[in-house]
Amino acid sequence: MRRNTRDRKIDGRLRLATGGVSAVLLSLTLGVFPFSPVHARQQGGHMEFDVASIKPSNPNGTGGTVVSATPAGRLHVANATIKDLIETAYDVRDFQIKGEPKWADADKYDIDATPGTAPQSAAASGGNWTVIRSEVQALLKDRFQLQVHRETRTAPIYSLVSAKSLSKSSVLSATQTPQKGINAGQGTMIGEAATMNQLAYKLSRLLQRPVVNNTGLDGNYDFKLEWTPDLALSAPDGQPVNTAAGPSIFTALQEQLGLRLRATKGPVDVMIVDHVDKPSQN
């Protein structure tokens, strides 16, 4: 249960930014549930940091998890566990990470790091996702001695499909507006010119299981999805959970959007943590 709460927190409050706040979506395919390979190297070789301050986060702090970088390459992290950082560094989700020690999903850190050489791509583009992920990878390897490897395993997944009675969803509202995205809150998702891949991504975060888009629905859609959250879970930032009787996420999808989640099994890329240490002293 704790993992679900944590992942919803990350989904709502994790910020990956280069001089601002942006959002990034993982690609979804009809085959292996993937993650993107990103290597902690730049054109000049392995990235190193001149200064890297790592401190335990304030246990009484109320702020969310933040991971950001300036165009010059300075990395700032607040209230992040090692598992949070692995998610960021390797573009994976909580349920794709296996083998980590318990402390890596519990102890939180604040980090400020300055690279010895500003990433070359940052100078040209003002920073980008590859640079941020490369920086976090380098930090994990240097200060936490992280060692990982990838595997593909057969695991439970959900297939997002149109309800049997509908060859095309008559509930979703198609739009010609350029693609935007989905705003997810406690028990609600509002899609504005959103794709079914984006919906599958949000559902995978919520359900802690890969969700593959097999709806056959192309294009962008406007929609509003409302359900009753699992009452055993806490709301982000201590907000009260709406306890009014209502549909589960599974029922809401079918009744409100004409879609269904079908439980099945499929290939899932996972990242195995072979070794990780608590951080070395500053």
Image: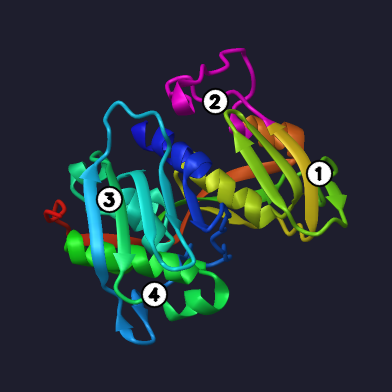
Q: Are marks 2 and 3 in contact (CB under 8 Å)?
A: no
**Residue that badge 2 annotates:** 229
The answer to which of 12 and 64 lies nearer the viewer is 64
The answer to which of 60 and 12 lies nearer the viewer is 60
The amino acid type found where label 3 is placed reads Ile
The amino acid type found where label 2 is placed reads Pro
Q: Is residue 250 left or right of residue 154?
A: right
Real-space Cα separation, disc 2 to disc 3, in angstroms: 27 Å
Q: Position of residue 1 (x, y in %)?
A: 37, 31
Q: Is residue 101 left or right of residue 84?
A: left
Real-space Cα separation, disc 3 to disc 4, in angstroms: 24 Å
Real-space Cα separation, disc 3 to disc 1, in angstroms: 39 Å
Residue stretch in magenta? 226-250
Q: Could you tell which of marks 2 and 3 lies nearer the N-terminus?
A: 3
Which numbered marker is on residue 118?
A: 4
Real-space Cα separation, disc 1 to disc 2, in angstroms: 22 Å
**Residue that badge 3 annotates:** 82
Q: Could you tell which of marks 1 and 2 lies nearer the N-terminus?
A: 1
Q: Are marks 2 and 4 in contact (CB under 8 Å)?
A: no
